[in-house]
Amino acid sequence: MSTKNSYQLADIGRHNPIFSQIRSTVETAFYGNNMHHVDDIAAAYHRATKDPGTVITDLPIYRATDLGLPADAKMLIANTGKVVGRTAQARRILGNPGVSEADMAGRLRQALFASAHKDFITTDVLVGLDEDFIVRAHLAIPDGFANNLLSYMLNFQPITAAYQEMFDRSVAYPEGDIYIYADPTYHDPDYPDDLAIFDPQHNTAAILGMPYFGELKKSTLTLAWSIAHRHGFVACHGGLKAFHFKDKQDQVFAMFGLSGSGKSTLTHAKHGYKYDITVLHDDAFVINRKDGSSVALEPSYFDKTNDYPMTSDETKYFMTIQNVGVTLDDQGRKVLVTEDLRNGNGRTIKSRYASTNRVDKEAAPINAIFWIMKDDSLPPVIKVDDPVLAATFGATLATKRSSAENIIGNVDRNALVIEPFANPFRVYPLSEDYHDFKALFEERHLDCYLLNTGFFGDKKIPKEVTLGALEAIVNDTTEWESFAGLEHMQNLKLADFPVDYANADYRNLVATRLGIRANFIDQYQHNNHDQLPHEIIDILVHLQDQLKQPITK
């Protein structure tokens, strides 16, 4: 499917559902005299090297010409100020309670008027890398933020001749292109934490006061996921990998977790090259509800730099970098200081070449979903064999906050929080995601697993245990036991992580954590017009009741 940005005269007006007040306000700005279009990566790179805040390192970009960059292109650094992560509190989504379209439109007009005499740069990219799902997006940002424009073009797919042909082949849907207007220099006086306005029904957003690149990436994905959701796809903030076999069915695994949960590590793990593995993506894709195939939304990776010192082979694939330090090596070269020494959440756009086994579409149907938790009441791996319970654990995915988020106020980053389906960027009702995922489990008979990548009790779960569990599942060599006597749940038997399911204190802890999930659903029902099905609360309460019953080994 594809989107459109030109119309017959008879199709322009209020009667066309593509148009809205916010969309018209934003799109109009793109045609102003102060807008200067950048249509290729090399031009964007040249602009970025001239920005006053840019640091041009002495580190070459790997396969630069294959990426559309000059042959001598170097990694570029752009650092922001105090805020180095996403600010969820800044989001105002049309359709949500208390968000007035008239109020947001007025604030947006004021922002546009205030910047009308400022030069902006614009570009176009594609989101979705196969004709099954490929939509066009447009970005406008002030001149002086060319690093963000370059990162945007490197993160998504620039419109080359080959991709334009793919876009043209794709079936056009009644959806307008995505428009993102960004002005990091404009601050609405009534929003001290800045303002991000979303009109998801009309594929439009305005990001005001926030220079962090992740806001541009996630706002674009937010709208692309929303388009996909409306047209028969399941929107996925996660990673997907496939194990291919000649003598049995391929195993296609999707990993869902927030930044820092380990989803990228699990997705990219090569398992000692024992298997024929392909990787779709580690952050953003969509699943076709009809045939179970999946399409990646981005060619590149927006990765944390914390785990990559200059001795790491992964730094070879960096292109642009945000919020890291710089120093001189023993050859006098300007190189990176990573490991979050300067600040938390250092980031890089890594090229697709970081994954040697990369595909843009996985035609083999998905057959397993892994919800990645950080809940110390859970053993490393649990299998769930009921569609309602599987979707319920997705809707109540429990984890910890990461450094990728700019948290406003006195919030404990170590507290257990619920982030449904690991997707804080949803702009449509949660109940619709619940029904989408439940349908995958019910209609396509997907397996479901809970992975705890944090602590079980006071014992850290190393990544080697989780990777070994994945291999055991692939090889069908797992040994399961009933998890605390609960229906539809079995934990993987691991000698180093025994489950004392007869221990009353442990059973109470598990019941308490299920209660946190039930309470989240109850609060969601009270605070939103959206209503989740009662079966979610029912099954969580039923599990709690089971835990109150004594059990013996």
Image (tube, helix red, strand yellow):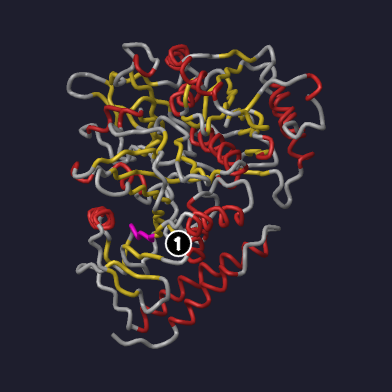
Tally the numbered discs: 1
In the picture shown, does residue 492 fall above or below 118? Answer: below
| In front of the other: 160 or 103 | 160
Q: Vertically, is 546 above or below 193?
A: below
Instruction: Write the start and end of the magenta stretch as one range.
Output: 449-453
Q: Is residue 450 magenta?
A: yes
Residue toward you, 437 or 340:
437
Q: Determine which residue is flagged by label 1.
A: 415
Looking at the rendering, in which quadrant would you find the N terminus?
top right
What predominant SS class does the magenta segment belong to? strand
The furthest residue to the front: 247
Q: Nearer the viewer, residue 528 or 281?
A: 281
Element under label 1?
A: loop
Residue located 45% across and 32% down the image: 298
Q: What amino acid type is highlighted by mark number 1?
A: Ala
Point 18% across, 19% down: residue: 331
| Left or right: 470 as drawn, with respect to 369 | left
Residue sitting at x 25%, y 63%: 478
Q: Is residue 216 left or right of residue 309?
A: right
Query: Considering only vertical position in the picture, is 153 above or below 460?
Result: above
| Vertical relation: 112 (above or below) 525 | above
Q: Quadrant of residue 350?
A: top left
